[in-house]
Amino acid sequence: MDYGEIWMRAKHVLKENVKLIKSKIKIINSIFCGTVIMANTIFVKSVDFKETIFIRSVDFRGDKFKGYAHFMSTQFGNNEDQDNIQEFHFEATKFQKDAYFTDAYFFGKSNFESAEFQKEAYFDFAQFYGSTRLVNVEFHGEVRFDNAHFFEDANFAISNFQKYAYFSTQFSKHLDLYHVRFHDVANFGAARFNENSKIKLNQAEFAKLYVDWAHFKDHLIYDLEGGEPVYLALIENFRDLGWFEDADDCYYEYRKAKMIENGRPYWSKLYDYVALLSCGYGVRPNFTIVCILGTILGLTQLTEDF
């Protein structure tokens, strides 16, 4: 996917016919049976859709929530209606106060592309049953996905996290963190990934990244486009955290991945292969011991034969 166009896409959101709602909105425990279109609307005061059900698609594109936005326990879409395509649009939406999507259910495609969360964003226990785009999103405050679940692909590409980001999250499919910037702690320590899940971390930048490397490494995609800097950044990250065993293991995985790269000269790959078998790239001392013992036994056997 070409992400180059996304940087400017937010500017193309329509600004004509902007609607201004000055009163507080509180519609709780209600059901909207038809499509809801509230695009290009400014909500001056807080909005509360707690425990409300939107049966069909919802359009909040280009909206500005000046007050608190409450979508706690809100249901977007109808899980029993698979014949109608349900989409939930929050592209280029600005949340100027805290935004709460705690325990929300999204039974369709969710799109927050180029949205802006100027304060805290809470997606605790949220369930995303369709593909989710959080591409080019600005998170100025703390963001939490505690016990959230993405059943389909979760795309956070080129998003910006200014403060603490917590992901004790279940990812059933793929996680895209291409060119994401974490300026504070990014905590994936309690994140869970299905067996076939893949993580794209190319060109990502992070100040401090907490991950369970033993499980994280099995899902990480390595390729020539930005793959090497990511591994090197992870190694430095683990060393800064004092996780030297993870740093060594990450270096080991990096060298293995690099060894099978296409386009490298034969002699270079041969050197890597020897380094792997003899000392595990310098971070597997037991390989050296086995190599020495094997050499001794081999020479002993050769001597006995003569």
Image: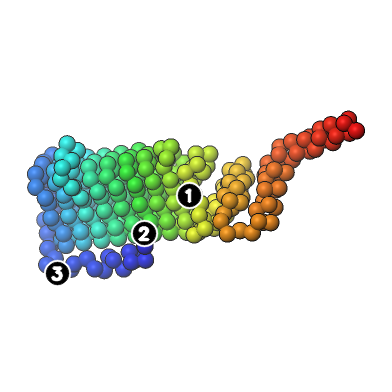
- Where the N terminus falls, by quadrant? bottom left
Q: CA distance from mark 2 to mark 1?
A: 16 Å
The residue to which callout 3 is attached is 16
- Residue, far right: 306
- Which mark identifies residue 221? 1
| Looking at the image, residue 148 lies above or below residue 184 | above
**Does residue 241 appear in the picture of this structure?**
yes
Query: In the rendering, at what x and y percent does residue 31 appear?
Result: 10, 41
Is there a contact, CB below 8 Å, between mark 1 and mark 3? Answer: no
- Which mark identifies residue 210? none
Q: What's the residue at 36%, 40% (across, down)? A: 172
Q: CA distance from mark 3 to mark 2?
A: 30 Å
Residue 142 versus residue 186: which sits nearer the camera? 186
Which element type, helix, strand or loop, lies under badge 2? Answer: loop
Of tags 3 and 2, which is closer to the observer?
2
Report whether 158 appears left or right of 9. Answer: right
